[in-house]
Image: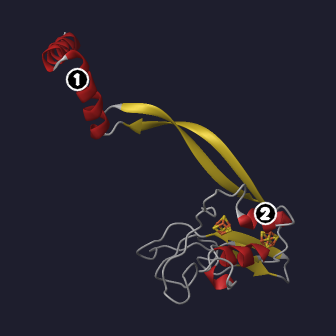
């Protein structure tokens, strides 16, 4: 398999749970941004971020909507934080058949955080901009990744070489190369 190096941009939102005060501004702006038309409503049930809230214990945990899961999990997680036990699946990011989290309330379609994809690109996702407590921190980094060269790209490359040097010359070079690899 032929690969080539490529730069990949990784976008992350770091969540500092200790700074979240449960104000839900992130839910409001996310649902407004994704309303159709944009900003025409702000139903937090349509938000791609949901804040798990326990005001008595002063615990607030923002959770981002992740991938859609076709089937519910066979096993479940239970979290105990500061002595309080949370519902099974409370902090899961998936939209799945076993609960109503991260589902568009009218259509039932799954919701997923898209980092506020828009044209032109926003400087920062809106939930980050609206979080006055800086509980949501936006980070962007570049990583080198190996990417498989698609056969079509190889074909285009070979075609241009054939046009330049002639098919006869090209096949001679390829067979010479393959002989030297065997040896
Ligand atoms: S806007 Fe910030 S502080 Fe308010 S609920 Fe969302 S994450 Fe927490
Ligand atoms: S990054 Fe954008 S889409 Fe994702 S939760 Fe925040 S506001 Fe919603």
**Whether residue 132 is situated above or below residue 4 in the rendered picture:** below
Q: How is the image coloured?
A: secondary structure
In this image, 137 relative to 174: left or right? Answer: right
Q: Nearer the viewer, residue 73 or 128?
A: 128
x, y percent for residue 142: 62, 39
Label total for image: 2
In this image, 48 relative to 150: left or right? Answer: right
x, y percent for residue 44: 68, 83
Q: Residue at x 55, y 70 (%)?
A: 112
Q: Residues within 10 Å of mark 1 (few under 14, many from 20)?
A: few
Q: Residue at x 58, y 64 (%)?
A: 114
Q: Residue at x 73, y 78 (%)?
A: 28
| Disc on the earlier residue, 1 or 2 | 2
**Label 1 sits on residue:** 163
Q: Which mark is residue 129?
A: 2
- Image quadrant in which you'd find residue 124: bottom right
Classify mark 2: helix, strand or loop. Answer: helix
Q: Residue furthest front?
A: 163
Q: Residues within 10 Å of mark 2 (few under 14, many from 20)?
A: some
Q: Which mark is residue 151?
A: none
Q: Nearer the viewer, residue 154 or 74?
A: 154
Marks 1 and 2, how far apart at CA: 53 Å
Ligand 1 occupies quarter: bottom right
Cβ(mark 1) to ligand 2 < 8 Å? no
Closer mark to the observer between disc 1 and disc 2:
1
């Amino acid at each position: 398999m032929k690969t080539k190096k490529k730069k990949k941009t990784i976008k992350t939102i770091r969540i500092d749970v200790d700074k979240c005060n449960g104000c839900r501004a992130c839910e409001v702006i996310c649902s407004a941004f994704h309303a159709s038309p944009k900003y025409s409503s702000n139903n937090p049930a349509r938000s791609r971020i949901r804040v798990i809230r326990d005001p008595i214990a002063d615990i607030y945990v923002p959770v981002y909507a992740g991938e859609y899961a076709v089937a519910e999990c066979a096993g479940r997680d239970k979290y105990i934080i500061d002595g309080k036990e949370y519902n099974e699946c409370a902090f899961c990011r998936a939209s799945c058949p076993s609960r109503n989290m991260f589902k568009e309330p009218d259509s039932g379609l799954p919701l997923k955080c898209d980092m506020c994809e828009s044209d032109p690109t926003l400087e920062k996702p809106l939930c980050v901009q609206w979080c006055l407590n800086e509980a949501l921190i936006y980070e962007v980094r570049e990583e080198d990744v190996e990417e498989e060269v698609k056969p079509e790209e190889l074909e285009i490359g070979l075609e241009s070489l054939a046009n330049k040097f002639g098919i006869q010359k090209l096949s001679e070079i390829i067979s010479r190369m393959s002989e030297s690899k065997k040896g």
